[in-house]
Amino acid sequence: MSTTATDLNGPTALGTFSFRPLDPLADAEVLHGWVTHPKAAFWMMQDAKLEDVEREYMAIASSEHHDAFLGLHDGEPAFLMERYDPRHIELVGLYEPEPGDVGMHFLVAPTDTPVHGFTRAVITAVMGELFADPATRRVVVEPDVTNKAVHALNEVVGFVPEREIQKPEKQALLSFCTREQFEAATGAAR
């Protein structure tokens, strides 16, 4: 599936974003470079070996409640998107899920030549992809409370923080974004 990222002024000049299911073995090397990069500290895989990345994404591929997708920018790997069912993983017992809730993680590939607005375009494309499924009513995220950059990005696409929660691996900011909040924040109507 292909999505063109949009902002408040319409299609961006940043190109086309598309998604394909992640291949845990074929994509492990590229992912390893991303998740162990210093800029991916909040991904919590800094010391992972290639085999650890393969194992992690093979477990996701075999889960009925978790999916991983390689995000492509103009056909080239540029980001990672994970979609999960918060009723079964990540947030079990930490909040009361509603019908249509979908959990999300995303990671943009590190680069030495950042493009202004690229990460915003990526999260907009990710949210558009999640809301392309009519069953998705609300996207749930739980970033580290200290990850101020992602909090700002989340706000741009319509997320509203609810409260801090303690997860086993981090203190997280539980935040939600409905389809209507996303459309209002980005002007993206489907």
Image (cartoon, rainbow, N blue to C red):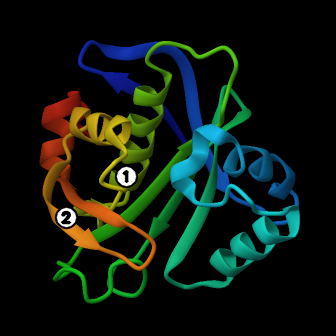
Of residues 37 and 181, the one drawn nearer to the viewer in this rendering = 37
Instruction: From the top left corner, tell me how far across and down residue 92 is, in percent.
Output: 32, 87
SS state under label 2: strand
Query: Which one is in front, 71 or 4?
Result: 71
140, above or below 187, in the image = below
Query: Is 158 rendered above or below residue 45?
Result: above
Q: Which mark is residue 164?
A: 2
Residue visible at 39% across and 17% down? 11
Mark 1 neighbour density, 10 Å: few (under 14) some (14–19) many (20 or more)? some
The kind of residue tagged 2 is Glu
Q: Which mark is residue 63?
A: none
Residue found at x 70% / y 19%: 112
Residue 22: percent from left, percent from top = 71, 59
Is residue 56 positioned above or below 139 on the image? below
Count the labels in the image. Answer: 2
For label 2, count other residues whose C-alpha is less than 10 Å away and answer few (under 14), some (14-19) or many (20+). Answer: some
The percent coordinates of residue 107 (x first, y second) are 55, 46
Q: Nearer the viewer, residue 153 or 165?
A: 165
**Residue name at image x 20 percent, y 51 percent:** 179
Kind of residue sitting beneath label 1: Ala
**For numbered disc 1, what is the local secondary structure?**
loop
Query: In the visual, does 124 lie left or right of 34?
Result: left
Question: What's the distance in space between the residues labelled 2 and 1, CA to CA?
Answer: 28 Å
Q: Which residue is mark 1?
A: 132
Q: Residue at x 47, y 64 (%)?
A: 83
Of 55 and 84, nearer the camera is 55
Splitting the image into 4 quarters, where does residue 96 fall?
A: bottom left
